[in-house]
């Protein structure tokens, strides 16, 4: 039984982590492609259209990866989490079915038109198809996070005698207080990823003295989108999301902030330290007094409950994992703001393209927004453990009762092998597109 | 309300089989009959801008199944764990085969992805046929051993096969001779369907040859259908009871046979879309007849201890189903608009789309 739960969790964690590397780019990138396309319509300067076309190639590759790794996600609710699906399908099935019906059809129909139909449709319609792809991808994110929010903060339901969750208020799924902060926070995270990818490849072109015209455009656009989104991801959306956790999941909040003991006169904010859960303390701590109380309740002396106030049976299953995920996300988010501010100032002073160290740093930042987004999701998911539906249904009670651990390990190994191959092919093809670079329109 | 969602779900499933069916069929044709680069191009061009959107129907079917019939979704997806995972892997291979082939101009690279696309298409057609076989044959619900359920009455697990390959064994496997036969029906009928689509959407040099292929395969299909029907009583002693009670249902077998026999005239069709119409009729009628034969069951029980799953005992609660109708109507309308736009823009022959060159 223990093994079954372990492998089911590993498989879901592995496949969702890999899957989300692709949508986090495509959601943000679709916005930036729409921007390039819009600039082209306004200015009629070919450079913008060429930029849009170049990023469409990267988008198409990522989209294909997102689709093929996304189908297993929908299947796994039933294959590995059958009891959970049976009990809650009447509720989360709503939002997941809506995702398929509203966003996947929209995205897939118009992506084909967007990729192959520029000559057939003319520029304005082409812009429209791009916009619809963007709309579809963000709607998909919205409905997934509506599902996620219900698991974090269940609303609009009742529980029947047989344990089944039944929907009794459809509107509540969408007015869930958890939803909007989580959605906006996530989308800003996605824009950060795409901004850094665009800026990083732009910096690569500039440093390499190749496609310099595009290099400048990419770096500039990446920095502007990145600066706006990395500020918005922290404030107000991140702040808002954290306050939800403090209010509705106080034990999770204590664990992710690393607060073992309630402090009189206000809680400190932990910057660095290693949680020692066995001895209920934090080693090598660097902290700033009272700041956490202020950030959470706007009062320096507000009380924040430490883990000591809760029963161990409701502790998050993996406190160190949760704590590190959260701190990695916040730490990287802070670095992003700092770096982009410097780059933004250099851009404003018109010195950016010659400030080599900033360009080098931007280029090497490529993996870090992926790490930050992944860490953010681990914070949300580890924070909900040991529950599938917070406070109502335990993870251990949601697995498929008839699928043996041996069979799950078999498929987990299969996914690891298959995704390693996919990852390799992806990197190879992405490198090929980047190496080839944007093509300039030739007027005859 | 359950009945309405059942009809919606079955309609969506049929649409999925007809649409992605021609993609799988094109893959099978690609594997066996497309020898030259030009032939291969014709096959991939024919499905190029469509296959991705067609696959979305599978996700949509999964979503609606999850939402409207959560118990059936949970029971069947965990019970058919291994074949479903393999279907997922095959779908991945098939998709990357299609997407990646054109990315690098190199004969070895192309050969690998051609085979990945073709073989995955073939196996998917086989697996979907086998899946249909499993649904009509039923499963050991509750995993009854010696007259006692070892699990909740709606859960089960099937290994890929058992030693006897028999649809009658106490411990069934996914693949036995009966389900395998339906798997072959899947392969042959989708190969025909895919060939018809290629003829419909391209002016390829392959087309005259494909008409012969369709004609010959149709004999195989007829033989398989006759053998299936004459052995059907082994898994269901009285498969015709629903048709006796509700004679209007006979329309479905009639549609099936119209499609099947119509295809024997494939060589004399003047219009290229006609063959596709007939293979569509065959798939639509065949699927509907099969599903109608077990109605209202959705997954029969092979033991006497636990009742079969019916559309009534696996459905979600009424409120959710009722409210779902509202958004579904809007979504279905939008989907119809998208499909109209898509098939309108990419109407006619697809020979010069240049798919895969982007």
Image: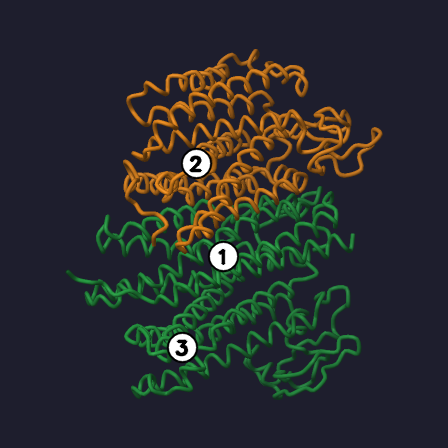
* Rendering coords of residue A167 (x, y %): 57, 46
- CB under 8 Å between callouts 3 and 1? no
Q: CA distance from mark 2 to mark 1?
A: 46 Å
Residue B112 lies, with reference to residue B351, above or below; the image says: below
Looking at the rendered image, the disc whose residue lies closer to the viewer, 3 or 2, is 2
In the rendered image, which quarter contains the C terminus of chain A?
bottom left
Disc 1 crowd, CA 10 A, few/some/many (<14, 14-19, 20+): few
User: Residue drawn 37% across and 59% down?
Assistant: A57
Instruction: Return the residue nearer the eye: B331 or B39.
Output: B39
The chain coloured orange carries which letter?
A: B
Image position of A196 (left or right of A351): right
Instruction: Return the residue nearer the eye: A178 or B314.
Output: B314
- Reading the image, the residue beneath label 1 is A175
Q: Chain letter for mark 3, please.
A: A
Q: CA distance from mark 3 to mark 1?
A: 29 Å
* Rendering coords of residue A398 (x, y %): 69, 50
Instruction: Return the residue nearer the eye: A372 or A287.
Output: A372
User: Residue drawn 51% across and 64% down?
Assistant: A182
Secondary structure of the residue carrying tag 2 is helix
- Reading the image, the residue beneath label 3 is A227
Q: Chain letter for mark 2, please.
A: B
Image position of A426 (left or right of B133): left
Residue A35 lies, with reference to residue B74, above or below; the image says: below
């Amino acid at each position: 039984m223990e093994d079954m739960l372990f492998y089911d969790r590993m498989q879901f964690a592995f496949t969702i982590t890999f899957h989300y590397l692709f949508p986090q780019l495509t959601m943000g990138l679709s916005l930036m492609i729409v921007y390039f396309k819009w600039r082209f319509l306004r200015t009629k300067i070919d450079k913008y259209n060429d930029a849009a076309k170049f990023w469409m190639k990267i988008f198409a590759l990522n989209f294909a990866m997102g689709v093929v790794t996304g189908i297993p996600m929908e299947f796994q609710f039933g294959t590995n989490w059958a009891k959970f699906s049976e009990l809650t399908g009447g509720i989360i099935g709503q939002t997941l079915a809506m995702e398929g019906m509203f966003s996947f059809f929209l995205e897939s129909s118009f992506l084909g038109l967007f990729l192959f139909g520029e000559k057939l449709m003319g520029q304005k319609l082409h812009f429209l198809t791009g916009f619809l792809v963007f709309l579809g991808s963000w709607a998909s994110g919205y409905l997934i996070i509506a599902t996620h929010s219900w698991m974090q903060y269940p609303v609009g339901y009742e529980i029947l005698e047989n344990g089944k969750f039944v929907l009794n208020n459809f509107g509540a799924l969408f007015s869930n207080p958890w939803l909007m902060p989580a959605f906006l926070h996530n989308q800003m995270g996605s824009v950060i990823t795409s901004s850094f990818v665009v800026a990083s490849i732009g910096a690569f072109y500039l440093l390499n003295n190749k496609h310099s015209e595009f290099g400048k455009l990419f770096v500039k656009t990446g920095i502007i989108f990145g600066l706006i989104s990395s500020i918005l991801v922290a404030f107000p959306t991140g702040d808002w999301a954290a306050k939800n956790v403090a209010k509705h999941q106080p034990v999770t909040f204590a664990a992710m902030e690393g607060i073992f003991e309630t402090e009189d006169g206000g809680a400190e904010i932990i910057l660095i330290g290693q949680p020692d859960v066995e001895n209920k303390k934090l080693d090598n701590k660097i902290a700033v007094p009272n700041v956490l109380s202020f950030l959470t309740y706007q009062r320096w002396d507000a009380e924040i409950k430490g883990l000591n106030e809760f029963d161990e049976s409701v502790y998050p299953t993996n406190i160190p994992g949760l704590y590190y995920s959260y701190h990695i996300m916040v730490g990287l988010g802070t670095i992003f703001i700092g770096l982009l501010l410097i780059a933004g100032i250099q851009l404003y002073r018109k010195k950016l393209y010659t400030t080599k160290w900033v360009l080098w740093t931007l280029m090497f930042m490529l993996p870090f927004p992926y790490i930050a987004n992944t860490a953010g999701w681990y914070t949300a998911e580890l924070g909900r453990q040991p529950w599938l539906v917070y406070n109502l249904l335990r993870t251990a009670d949601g697995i498929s009762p008839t699928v043996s651990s041996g069979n799950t390990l078999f498929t987990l190994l299969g996914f690891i092998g298959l995704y390693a191959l996919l990852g390799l092919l992806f990197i190879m093809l992405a490198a090929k597109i980047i190496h080839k670079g944007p093509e300039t329109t030739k007027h005859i | 309300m359950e009945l309405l969602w059942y009809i919606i779900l079955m309609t969506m499933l049929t649409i999925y089989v007809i649409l992605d069916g021609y993609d799988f069929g094109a893959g099978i044709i690609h594997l066996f009959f497309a020898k030259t680069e030009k032939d291969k191009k014709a096959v991939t061009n024919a499905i190029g801008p469509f296959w991705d959107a067609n696959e979305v129907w599978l996700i949509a079917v999964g979503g609606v199944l999850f939402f409207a019939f959560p118990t059936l979704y949970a029971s069947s997806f965990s019970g058919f764990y291994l074949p479903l995972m393999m279907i997922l892997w095959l779908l991945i291979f098939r998709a990357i085969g299609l997407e990646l082939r054109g990315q690098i101009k190199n004969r070895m690279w192309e050969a690998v992805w051609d085979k990945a696309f073709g073989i995955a298409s073939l196996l998917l057609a086989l697996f979907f046929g086998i899946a249909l076989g499993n649904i009509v044959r039923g499963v050991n619900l509750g995993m009854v051993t010696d007259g006692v359920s070892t699990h909740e009455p709606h859960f089960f697990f099937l290994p890929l096969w058992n030693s006897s390959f028999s649809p009658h064994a106490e411990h069934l496997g996914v693949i036995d001779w009966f389900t395998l036969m339906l798997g072959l029906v899947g392969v042959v009928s989708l190969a025909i369907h895919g060939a018809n689509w290629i003829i419909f959407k391209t002016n390829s040099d392959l087309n005259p040859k494909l008409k012969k292929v369709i004609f010959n395969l149709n004999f195989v299909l007829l033989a398989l259908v006759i053998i299936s029907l004459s052995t059907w009583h082994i898994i269901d002693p009285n498969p015709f009871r629903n048709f006796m009670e509700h004679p209007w249902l006979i329309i479905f077998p009639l549609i099936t046979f119209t499609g099947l026999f119509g295809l024997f005239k494939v060589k004399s069709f003047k219009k290229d879309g006609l063959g596709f119409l007939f293979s569509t009729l065959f798939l639509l009628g065949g699927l509907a007849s099969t599903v109608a034969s077990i109605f209202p069951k959705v997954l029969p029980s092979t033991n006497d201890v636990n009742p079969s799953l019916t559309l009534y005992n696996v459905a979600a609660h009424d409120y959710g189903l009722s409210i779902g109708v509202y958004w579904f109507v809007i979504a279905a309308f939008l989907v119809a608009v998208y499909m109209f736009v898509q098939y309108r823009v990419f109407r006619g022959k697809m020979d010069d789309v240049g798919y895969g060159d982007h």
